Image (tube, rainbow, N blue to C red):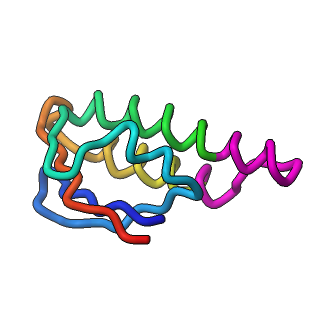
């Protein structure tokens, strides 16, 4: 599943989650401060990876890579309280 995120610099990224659990953490059209978004992404993508582990015996490397990408993009933002908007989901 993909979720589209609008960053403070107005760029939009398609992010990957191996599980629909991401929908429990983010509401379409909802916004959160960058620091909160990163924390929620960490929880959601870790949970999604653990669901893969439960079913297949190993975590999801792609979810871990997505989290690293989110953390890297966030670290480059000057305003850590700027709003991030989840624009939608794609299945």
Q: Nearer the viewer, residue 86 or 21?
A: 21
The answer to whether 15 appears left or right of 87 in the picture is: right
Q: Given the current orientation, which residue lies at the most extreme right position?
A: 57
| Residue at 66% from the left image edge and 46% from the top image edge | 49
The answer to whether 9 appears left or right of 34 in the picture is: left
Residue 71 percent coordinates (x, y): 42, 43
| Residue at 59% from the left image edge and 58% from the top image edge | 18
> What is the span of residues highlighted in magenta in the rendered image?
49-64
| Residue 85 in the image: above or below residue 88 | above
Residue 60 on the magenta span: yes
Q: Nearer the viewer, residue 33 or 21?
A: 21
| Residue 6 in the image: above or below residue 90 | above
Q: Nearer the viewer, residue 35 or 27?
A: 27
| Residue at 24% from the left image edge and 44% from the top image edge | 27
The answer to whether 11 appears left or right of 16 in the picture is: left
The image quadrant of residue 60 is bottom right
Residue 86 percent coordinates (x, y): 23, 52
Residue 20 on the magenta span: no
The image quadrant of residue 32 is top left
Residue 30 percent coordinates (x, y): 16, 43
Residue 65 percent coordinates (x, y): 58, 56
Majority secondary structure in the magenta region: helix
């Amino acid at each position: 599943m993909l979720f589209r995120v609008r960053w403070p610099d107005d760029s939009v990224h398609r992010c990957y989650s191996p599980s629909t659990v991401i929908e429990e953490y983010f509401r379409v059209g909802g916004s959160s401060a960058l620091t909160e978004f990163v924390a929620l992404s960490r929880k959601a993508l870790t949970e999604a990876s653990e669901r893969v582990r439960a079913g297949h015996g190993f975590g999801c490397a792609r979810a871990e890579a997505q989290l690293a990408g989110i953390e890297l993009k966030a670290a480059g933002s000057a305003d850590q309280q700027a709003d991030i908007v989840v624009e939608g989901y794609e299945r």
